[in-house]
Image (spheres, rainbow, N blue to C red):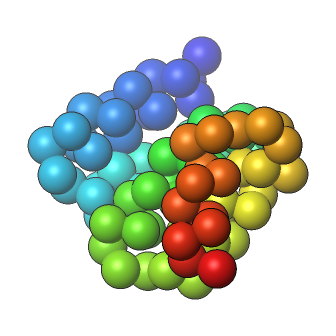
Amino acid sequence: MESEAIRQRGNEEFTKGNFSLAADLYSRAIEFRPDNHLLFGNRAICFLRLGKYKNALCDGKKATILRSNYPKVRGFRIVIE
């Protein structure tokens, strides 16, 4: 459950526009749930907003590996690649 609480905090920070802090929170949550595609997808979008395109692409790929039909990430992967 700790992973979910951290993810929710990351979502709150993302909504406020604190993309760096949100990415850090998603990273902490990934330590608990490295199999969660949502965490990688959310962190990828943070990296995209921060201009860290290589990191965004890496996380986007990981999210789609974990769940191949994940639409949130598939779209911006096309743009980055």
Answer above or below: position of 53 versus 43: below
Q: Residue at x 34, y 35 (%)?
A: 11
**Residue 26 x/y as whole percent:** 49, 47
* Above or below, 37 relative to 50: above
Can you give x and y, in whole percent of width and height, for residue 29 in the image? Answer: 57, 41
Residue 49 location, x and y as percent? 32, 66
Taking the view exactly as shown, the residue that stands out farthest to the left is 16
Q: In screen coordinates, is 70 left or right of 5? A: right
Residue at point 55%, 76% (across, down)? 80
Q: Is residue 40 visible?
A: yes
Looking at the rendering, which quadrant does residue 24 occupy? bottom left
Q: Nearer the viewer, residue 72 or 14?
A: 72
In this view, the residue in front, 44 or 21, is: 44
Query: Eyeballing the image, is 23 above or below 71?
Result: below
Residue at the image position 76 percent from the left and 57 percent from the top: 62
Rendered-image quadrant of the N terminus: top right
Q: Is residue 61 left or right of residue 47?
A: right
Can you see residue 28? no
Q: Which quadrant would residue 79 be assigned to in this image?
A: bottom right
Please tell me which residue is depicted at 32% across the width and 73% down the height of the picture.
Answer: 50
- Residue 71, percent across and down? 63, 39
52 to the left or right of 68: left
State which quarter of the image contains the C terminus: bottom right
Q: Count up the numbered dots.
A: 0
